[in-house]
Image: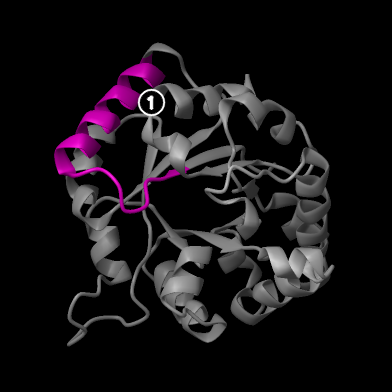
Amino acid sequence: MRKKIVAGNWKMNLDLQEGLALANELKAALAADQPNCDVVICTPFIHLAKVADVVEGTVIGLGAENCANKEKGAYTGEVSAAQVKSTGAQYVILGHSERRQYYCETPELLKEKVNLALANGLKVIFCIGEVLEEREAGKQNEVVGAQLADSLFDLTEEQLSNIILAYEPVWAIGTGKTATAEQAEDMHAFIRGCIAGRFGEAAAENISILYGGSCKPSNAKEIFSKPDVDGGLIGGAALKCADFKGIIDAWK
């Protein structure tokens, strides 16, 4: 049975003190009102070790927003998967559209990152999605199918069990635009079909596919009600405890 998950992506927001305050606030809120889904917060590298202390023994999982494609060595400014794991984190986001767009991350590079993250015992939240021009040209399935195949289709079925997929219609990130629940379901069903075609029906049924395009407390319940939507990867709304909890509560 695949897991329901709400994961927050803090992006490059919140200094250390602000991040710790938010983690503590969320910890208290979820202790008082247990969630019906897995909850993960993915933070900047500087927060990981201290936030790990805050959320230890709670229902909150912890992840990084990226890791290097090298194991270790003379790569100034990079943070390896092993270093992420050593902080107490269990997850890492890879393939986010902002990394693909602003830092020119290629499918080959992402494949290296995925393999290193899995080798170091991290669960990978792997992002896929199309930009507005691709959606308007009707190429969204072609684009997303290629993103899956180029970075993940060399994995074993066992490795795939530690992958969570996140579909992010890039045109709906931070723009205020949101894919309709039907558009989200259509793409999630297509993604699940791609996984079934490569890894089999059982693997496809077991993989969680999150929606990652401007999900809010006001629309989460409708989006999460769709059969192939297993939760959300939340950006801006993850920076306020009340908003994030409002999305978590959509599973109730």
Q: Which residue is rendered at x = 54% and y = 59% of the image? A: 162
Is-magenta flag for residue 17? yes
Front residue of 81 and 42: 42
- Say if 42 sits above or below 250 in the image: below
The location of residue 40, given as percent across then percent down, is 43, 41
User: On the rendered structure, is 59 left or right of 232?
Assistant: left
Quadrant location of the N terminus in the rendered image = top right
Front residue of 16 and 123: 16
Asked where in the image residue 113 lies, by quadrant, the reply is bottom left
Q: Residue furthest top?
A: 32
The location of residue 80, given as percent across then percent down, is 28, 72
**Could you tell me what secondary structure mostly forms the magenta stretch?**
helix
Amino acid found under the numbered disc labelled 1: Cys
Asked whether residue 53 appears in the rendered view, the answer is yes
Asked where in the image residue 53 lies, by quadrant, the reply is top left
Quadrant location of the C terminus in the rendered image = top right
Is-magenta flag for residue 178? no
Q: Which residue is rendered at x = 56% and y = 67% of the image? A: 159
Read off the magenta span: 8-31
- Say if 235 sits above or below 152 in the image: above
The location of residue 26, given as percent across then percent down, is 34, 26
Q: Which residue is mark 1?
A: 241
Q: Which residue is rendered at x = 59% and y = 38% of the image? A: 215
Q: Which residue is rendered at x = 67% and y = 72% of the image? A: 148
The location of residue 85, given as percent across then percent down, is 29, 59
- Say if 77 sits above or below 54 in the image: below
Q: Quick one: label 1, few (<14), some, or many (20+) residues within 10 Å?
A: some
